[in-house]
Amino acid sequence: MKAKKKGHSSPARAHGGARESLAVGTQTIEFDDNRLAKVLFGEHDRHLTRIESQIDVELAPRGNRLTIRGSSQARARAERALQALYDDLIQGRLIDPGAVDAAVRMVDSHVQTAVEGRALRTPRRVISPRTETQATYLEALASHDLVFGFGPAGTGKTYLAVAAAVAEMTRGAVDRIVLSRPAVEAGERLGFLPGDMREKVDPYLRPLYDALHDMLPAELVAHKLETGDIEVAPLAFMRGRTLTHSFVILDEAQNTSPMQMKMLLTRLGEGSRMVVTGDPTQVDLPPGLESGLADARTVLRGVPGVAMIEFRESDVVRHPLVTRIVTAYNRRTEGAGEREAPPATSGPAPSVTAGRARRGKPRA
């Protein structure tokens, strides 16, 4: 955005419950492309309203111009968020409420420059990281043969992994994509579901199909599933195989046993890469059975070529309420742990750990 700016400041005063005590002023920015400016503002200015709800500013559009009113700090934050969104539009990316929230988050975390060039291009859309952890995750996916993603639902662990797989297949880096989940019964019995084995396990794999259809045309997904270029199968079907020149993703890995996890990890063949994702707090295994994800987290930490990325509730990119729900449950769990567990003898694990990458720098 090559925006022309002009503005002035006035003495500080109360402004919409302002949290910033700096001088309140206004500035006007002008966008080069009227059509993109309209998309940026959103239908009925809904994107601007969303920014106003998160940054203490008032935004007044007029044609391809936008007046920002607020403290100098708030105006600068709003302008950087708008700049990022406008740049996304120029590069052909879609703008939705989630993208607006992500732009504000990235501005607040001061990592905007760190995520430039981290976008993944798939046939249907360009996918960019929406949090600092997602940016680190994409970097790990580009530079390691085995990546673990730990964290709550809604943080993009699986979605970004599928995006990376589709991008790699599109540019010819891998020959096929293998997507897998353990078919763990959470209160229902597979035997009582109608249909053959594929029809019984498909509901467990539906989130993976949804991600594929987000990134590839429906007819291309159907064709690649038919030819085997994309395979979606329960974990049990992986036994005894060697997966070469493949991008392998294991989702819901917290519901594997240590033996199953070892079995899958040792399927990795020449020219292949693997991503393992899961939420350690949502284990559906029978009581007393250790999670293979938790076991691998301990056994493989620091192994060269292995990256481990920890997502937090602040990385949730679904409905804002999901973040508050995850935080509430985590608070209760941590409270129970404090009442029952002995005092900790060591600090928390780092949010990101990685073994030595297979190359000195990420691939282009």
Image: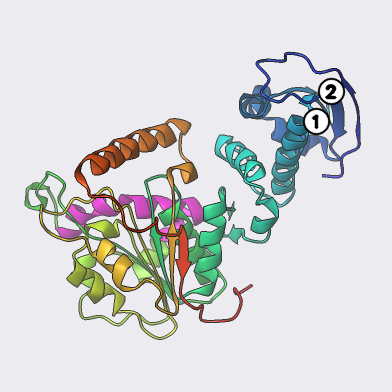
At 14% across and 57% down in the image, what residue appears?
196
Q: Which residue is mark 2?
A: 25
Specify the amino acid type for callout 1.
Answer: Ser
Q: Position of residue 213 (x, y in %)?
A: 44, 52
Q: Position of residue 129 (x, y in %)?
A: 57, 52
Q: Is residue 140 left or right of residue 275?
A: right
What kind of element bears circle 1? helix
What residue span does the magenta drawing correspond to? Answer: 197-221
Is the magenta region chiefly helix, strand or loop?
helix
92 shown above or below 230: above
Q: Is residue 227 left or right of residue 45?
A: left
Q: Alpha-carbon neighbours of circle 1 within 10 Å: few (<14), some, or many (≥20)?
A: many
Tell which of 344 and 63 is nearer to you.
344
Q: Position of residue 84 (x, y in %)?
A: 71, 45
What kind of element bears circle 2? strand
Mark 1 and mark 2 residues within 8 Å of each other at the beta carbon: yes
At 69% across and 48% down in the image, what residue appears?
88
222 shown above or below 67: below
329 shown above or below 291: above
Q: Is residue 84 left or right of residue 260?
A: right
The disc at residue 72 is 1
Task: Answer with mark 1 or mark 2, whichever residue precedes in sequence.
Answer: 2
Count of numbered tags: 2
Which quadrant would residue 142 be assigned to in this image?
Answer: bottom right
Tell which of 77 and 210 is nearer to you.
77
Residue 40 appears anywhere in the view: yes
Residue 220 counted in the magenta span:
yes
Q: Position of residue 288 (x, y in %)?
A: 10, 56
Marks 1 and 2 sit apart, C-alpha to C-alpha, by: 7 Å
Q: In what quadrant of the picture does the C terminus appear?
A: bottom right
Which quadrant would residue 6 be assigned to in this image?
Answer: top right
Residue 272 counted in the magenta span:
no
